[in-house]
Amino acid sequence: MSSLDRASPMPLWAQIAADLRARIAADEFRARFPTDMELVQHYGVSRHTVREALRQLGSSGVLERQRGRGTVLAPQPTLEQPMRAFYSLAESIEAQGLAEHSDVLLFEPRFDAAAAARLSLAADAPLTYIERLRFAGDEPLALDCSWLPETLGNLLHPGALSSGSLYEQLARLAGVRVTGGSERISAALPDARLRSLLRLPRSAAALRIERTAVAADRPVEYRISTVRGDRYAFVADWGLGRG
């Protein structure tokens, strides 16, 4: 039997829903999702409590009730990013009908010789490091790790980065407009912290996106993003060529 904190102000159904979310993220129910009675026995609660937890997970798009099959994991949409001009993850999420927001995990001064080189700065140049966990709806989609010249980072603040694009804030608060950049996309093997933050199933891969953004000819951001490979895909449309 799973231990629930019956003295907690959090209702039992909410504790069960949170535990089920964690177990789903750990890929525990790949073969099948438990029946209501199996969950009743596992958590030692009433069937009504279990059904309320499942109802909440259903309303948030995690589970589906299907006639003849019981409760199953809901298929999660894959966000498609066209490979064309410079793009914004926030805009891509909203364009596909999902709410976006970010948790700012770190916002601090740093020295990083490798990042400084990407920004065409001296190795000992002071930088601002920003770490944001990006969400599509209620699900984490990407972890963005950004380095900016300290002169620009000092004009930003964490509260302004809880939604929308970093580049919107650079334009609004620093008067700097990103005009282009370059990216390198490769496969990634996330460590335990990254996998936990992204709620990435053990069976799922991730993408690493390394970006340098420029304003005119001046590098203004170096970023490494780790994106869930089970929820995000790049799409290219090709014209007729010579093969």
Image (tube, helix red, strand yellow):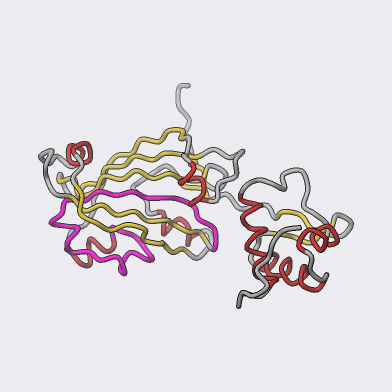
For image coordinates 81% across by 63% down, the residue present is: 40
Q: Which residues are magenta?
A: 138-167
Is residue 165 on the magenta stretch? yes
Using the image as rendered, state which of residue 125 and residue 69 is in the foreground: 125
Provide residue 196's location: percent of width, then percent of height: 51, 49
Q: How many numbered tags mark residues here?
A: 0
Relative side of 120 to 181, left or right: left
Figure check: 220 above or below 71: above
Relative side of 75 to 168, left or right: right
Provide residue 20's location: percent of width, then percent of height: 67, 58
| Quadrant in which residue 43 is drawn | bottom right
Figure check: 162 above or below 110: below
Is residue 188 on the magenta stretch? no
Which image quadrant: the N terminus?
bottom right
Using the image as rendered, state which of residue 38 and residue 163 is in the foreground: 38
For image coordinates 83% across by 60% down, the residue present is: 41
